[in-house]
Amino acid sequence: FSTAAGPMQTMTVSDSTLSNNLNRGVFARGAHATVLVEDSTLSNNGADPYTTGGNDGYAVIARNGAAVTVQNNTITNPATQVSGVSYAFHASVTGSSLLVRGNQISNGNIFQLTGGTSALAYANNITGFS
């Protein structure tokens, strides 16, 4: 969680596999958190999130002003859901942003956004979505 001035958290995930995380695959939080996820596979993340208070699962989430870029990945949402709902991408709390480009995305829900956030998505191949 980043609240100080200037860049505090800069992370790159490249050529990796993130799979079978029950709650989230990538979770960036804070106005000075920047994440790049590229050339990776994210699969079956968010299938069974802790649901007290109505939690959902996500492959990638940006909160509290974080900026996340997701490019050139293969992203597959869970085929079945134990609890909650799963989404490929989520942004919440004013100032959070998602840039989603050049990904192969399949199964289920794609975006969940709340007020004051931004998402730019282009050149993605999306199949089997709802």
Image (cartoon, rainbow, N blue to C red):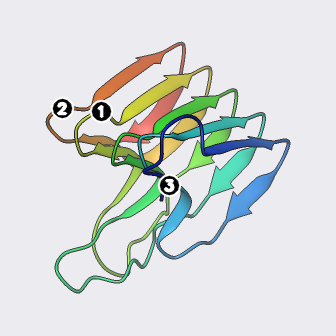
* Along the viewing direction, whichever of 28 and 77 lies nearer the viewer: 28
Q: Secondary structure at mark 2?
A: loop
Real-space CA distance between mark 1 and mark 2, rounded to the nearest whole angstrom: 6 Å
Residue on which disc 2 sits: 116
Contact (Cβ within 8 Å) of mark 2 with mark 3: no
Q: Are marks 1 and 2 in contact (CB under 8 Å)?
A: yes
Q: Is disc 3 surrounded by few (<14), some (14 to 19) or many (20+) residues within 10 Å?
A: many
Going 36% across and 40% down the picture, which residue do you hit?
Answer: 65
Q: Amino acid at mark 2?
A: Gly
First along the sequence among labels 1 and 3: 3
Distance between the Cα atoms at labels 2 and 3? 25 Å
Left or right, residue 11 beside residue 60: right
In the picture, the disc for residue 95 is 1
Residue at position x 85%, y 42% from top? Answer: 15
Dot 3: what SS? loop
In the rendered image, the quadrant that contains the C terminus is top left
Against 108, is 74 above or below?
A: above
Q: Position of residue 68 (x, y in %)?
A: 52, 35
Q: Is residue 22 above or below residue 76?
A: below
**Which amino acid, mark 3?**
Asn
| Residue 98 picture location, percent across and down | 43, 31
Nearer to the camera, 104 or 101? 101
Label 3 sits on residue: 77
N-terminal of the pair, mark 2 or mark 3, is 3
Mark 1 vs mark 3, foreground winner is: 1
The disc labelled 1 sits on which kind of residue? Gly
Check residue 104 in the rendering and tell me which mark sits there, or answer none.
none
The residue at the point 19 percent across, 75 percent down is: 54
Is 114 located above or below residue 25 in the figure? Answer: above
The reply, left or right, for residue 70 in relation to residue 3 is: right
For label 1, the crowd category at 10 Å Cα-Cα, with few meaning under 14, some 14 to 19 and many 20 or more, is some
